[in-house]
Amino acid sequence: MPTTVPSACPSCGAALSPASDRCDLCGTPTTADAARQPDPVTPASEASAATTCVSCGHDNPAGARFCNECGTALGTKPASPAVPPLSAGGASGERPPSDVGKRAVLFVGAAIGVVLALYALTALVGGREATLEEAPNTSATPAGTAAAVALPEGDAPPLPGPTAQSQADAFEAEATAEGYYESARYYLTAAYENQQSNPEASRLWAHEAVVRLEQSLEVNDNPDVRVALAEAAAFEGVDPMRPIQEAQAVLDADPTHPGANLFMGQRRLMIGRVEQAREAFETVVANTEVGDPARESAESALAMIASQTVPSAE
């Protein structure tokens, strides 16, 4: 007498193939003959791996080919995220190259590019209005600072890009000075790249960068990292005095430090203190080699200053 195959699995209700003697979803035998056949003996470790879904963790019946909770094929291994080696600069396509000092300068240089563009635009106005900001009351606030602004509410959103967040997390998990710095760099890069399209998220990412740079400095007080902290704190905007204080701390120890002078020149140019900015940029040029990113940024700033007839605020 021919065996009749039911149209639906009696265990999970999945549709059955007429030619199959078992349910493709849960593995339940669908004919009397199949039910009488013993399942092949499988070691416990393999059975667990084969029937436990790697996606949702659901334990499925022995012989199941797919998870009857989420439908994932069983017996596959979860993909392990690849953590880029610390020395693999640029391997992911999302990380700027070079060493810590040069990367810190790149952050400051990017900000200077924005300042110079605004400087060139406002210089066309002429007179006192050509300065980017009204000169602050220097008896109360250091030059180059701005009013404090509270951070947007909520947590920072995940970093944009397919791998940026996982790589930032991997570097942070190293719990080293370099690891914290590398993680911060992902957040600060995202802050710069999205400041026009998503300003609130950019400030939250800058705050995350500040936290990680502070952790890096706790492990190793590196002046280049402190310059990056000054830039991140300026972008964050929570404490208007901190960026200048961090950069000045570097200059107190090394008055010729290129990154700190570049940052201070940027801040001074923003409030129209052209001569002080010029001195800072000239210090950068005098203490760097041709082709150095800091020197190139300083030379661009000096060229822009020289091309404008803008009265300084001093």
Image: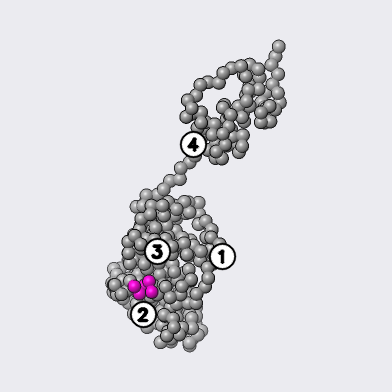
* CB atoms of marks 2 and 1 within 8 Å: no
Kindly identify the amino acid type of the residue bearing the numbered disc 3.
Answer: Glu
Q: Which residues are magenta?
A: 245-249
Q: CA distance from mark 4 to mark 2?
A: 60 Å
The tag earlier along the polypeptide, 3 or 4, is 4
Percent x, y of residue 90: 40, 54
| Element class at badge 1 | loop
Residue under numbered circle 2: 278
Identify the main secondary structure in magenta: helix
Q: Earlier in the sequence, mark 1 or mark 3?
A: 1
Q: Identify the mark at residue 214; answer none if there is no mark.
A: 3
Along the line of sight, which residue is nearer the eye, 47 or 226?
Answer: 47
* Neighbour tally class for label 3: few under 14, some 14-19, many 20 plus, Cα within 10 Å: some
Q: Residue at x 45, y 85 (%)?
A: 137
Residue 83 vs residue 286, the one in the foreground: 83
Amino acid type, residue under disc 1 in the picture: Glu
Q: Residues within 10 Å of mark 1 (few under 14, many from 20)?
A: few
Determine the CA span between mark 1 and mark 3: 22 Å
